[in-house]
Structures are given as C-alpha cells and as structure tokens.
Amino acid sequence: MKTVGVIGGSGLYDMGGLESVERVRLSTPFGDPSDEYVCGVLGGTRIVFLPRHGRGHRLLPTEVNFRANVFGMKKLGAEWVIGVASVGSLKEEIAPGHIVVPDQLIDRTSRRPSTFFGNGIVAHVAFADPFCPVTSAALVTAARAAGATVHPEGTYVCMEGPQFSTRAESHLYRQWGAAVIGMTNLQEAKLAREAEMCFATLALATDYDCWRESTADVEIGEILRILKENVAMAQKTVVNLVDRLDARRSCACVNALEHAIITDRTQIPAKVKRDLAPIIGKYI
C-alpha cells in the first residue's frame, strides 16, 4: 500500500472517505514532532497527516521541529510528502485564492536546523531542483481536477518570520522574480530530500504581501478567511492526488543519498548509525 504524508493545517485530516483512522504519537532522535500523526486509508492509499504548527496553531514557524516532523513521516513509511501552506503572492497574476505548485526555493531563514546530518556523519545531497518534478506534476493535475486555478511553477521565498515582509523586502523579492513568499517549506524540502522522499508543495495564496499599493497590507483576519475557504479545495486535491502517484517511483529522489554520504563508514559513531537507520540504513 502506498503511503503519502501531508503536512499542513489541522483541518486537512477532517475529510470524508478516510477510513481506519488512528492517531500515532512518535519520538525521534531530534525530539518530538509538532503533534500526533493522523493515519488513515483513502481509496487504497495510506495517508499520514501532521498539523505543522500543532493542533490549535501553537508553534511559530521558527519553533516547528522540522527534523522531527519529517523523520516521523519516514518512520511511518511515507514515500511522498505534500507540504500544504499559505503564502503571499509576489505576482499580479497570482490572486488570493489561487494555488501555486512551486519548482524553486530561496532560503531567507536563519535560525532553523535543516539537515539530519552532523555529529560524526557528513552528507551533501543534490538540491538544484528542490521539489520532486514527478510529484509536482501530479499535484498540479490533481488541483486542477479539484477546480482550482493553478500556477504550475514559481519560486517560493521562505522567510524566517513570524512578522510579515517589509515593503522594501517585498519589492526586492519581486525583483528577484519570486512568485510567492511563506515561512515553512524550505526545511521540509531539504529534509525530505535527505530522507529520499518525494516532496512537493501546495501553496495557497492568501494575499498580495505588501508590495501592491492598490491593495490593503497583509491582514491576518483576511488571510484566515481565505485559508478556511481553501481547506476544502486542498482536501479535494489530496483525494485526487493519491490515484495519480505511481507506486514505482522512478525519480532521482529515490536514491538521493546514494553518493551523498562522504564520511568514512568506519568513522561514523554507532549511535548515529542507530539514530539515522530509517534514513541511511540501506547505505551503511
């Protein structure tokens, strides 16, 4: 049975058709994940949901334990992970309510661990194309089938937060050619690549950030209103996606670590080997 992980808002897992639902609480070598994982079966596919900020939205973006969250997905058998997140639009044509499936990332974070490695083991995975192209293409098709207006590419700027952008920053990112700005998906993409999982993002545009002079600056109330409207669309997209994923993964994500671990195997500490066994076990 295929296993697909979904990291996003807590409302995502309250969806019709999800059977054999159970809650799983995990511990990891990197601490505790944001919350319990909600596991269920949807049309023959196992789905694992995790509320990124914890139920009740308790965690700042900087406080999210991304390593524990992704490691837990790996332990639960997820081969695909979809990051569902709200973003601000940096382009006129990406209107609030539209969906973007980005193909590139710019890292503007500064306070977040972004790798499983260290403590005696070094690995350098390729990250030129940070999202799985096969999964992203399937996600675009699934979102369009759900009735969404979808932009199939674009650069996602990941900022530290929790404050929104200054107007100068917003104009700068537009000059860079970026499409959307958010606070979460950079670490998820990096860690999923290290864990050899296929990662793609369903970015829900909620506002025009603060660059658009003819529109009011970002207001959290309006963002929450649009997000609520988009939950049903995201649920439909997940339902449409599961049947479009080929269980025989053929993308480069599958073997991302094959030549990435450069540490002499005899020098890797035994504890590190044990801790990282779900990720590096087939190579060490």
Image (tube, helix red, strand yellow):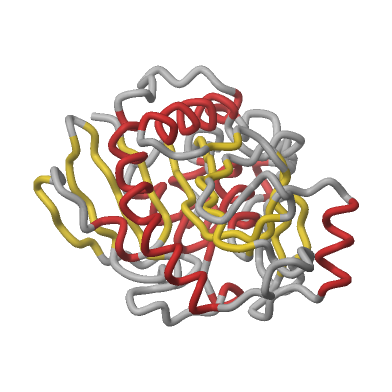
The image position of residue 242, as x and y in percent, is 32, 31
Judge from the rendering whether residue 233 lies leftward or rightward of residue 284; answer left or right: left
For image coordinates 29% across by 60% down, the residue present is: 37
Judge from the rendering whether residue 276 lies leftward or rightward of residue 35; answer left or right: right
Which image quadrant: the C terminus? Answer: top right
Please indicate, yes or no, whether residue 116 appears anywhere in the rendered image: no
Camera-nearest residue between 55 and 231: 231
Camera-nearest residue between 63 and 220: 220
Which image quadrant: the N terminus? Answer: top left
The image position of residue 3, as x and y in percent, is 31, 37
Residue 90, placed above or below residue 168: above
For image coordinates 13% across by 53% down, the residue present is: 21
Residue 111, placed above or below residue 276: below
Q: How many marks?
A: 0
The image position of residue 12, as x and y in percent, is 31, 56
For image coordinates 21% across by 58% down, the residue present is: 14
For image coordinates 68% across by 53% down, the residue present is: 180
The quarter holding residue 258 reads top right
The image position of residue 210, as x and y in percent, is 74, 70
Please indicate, yes or no, whether residue 113 appears anywhere in the rendered image: yes
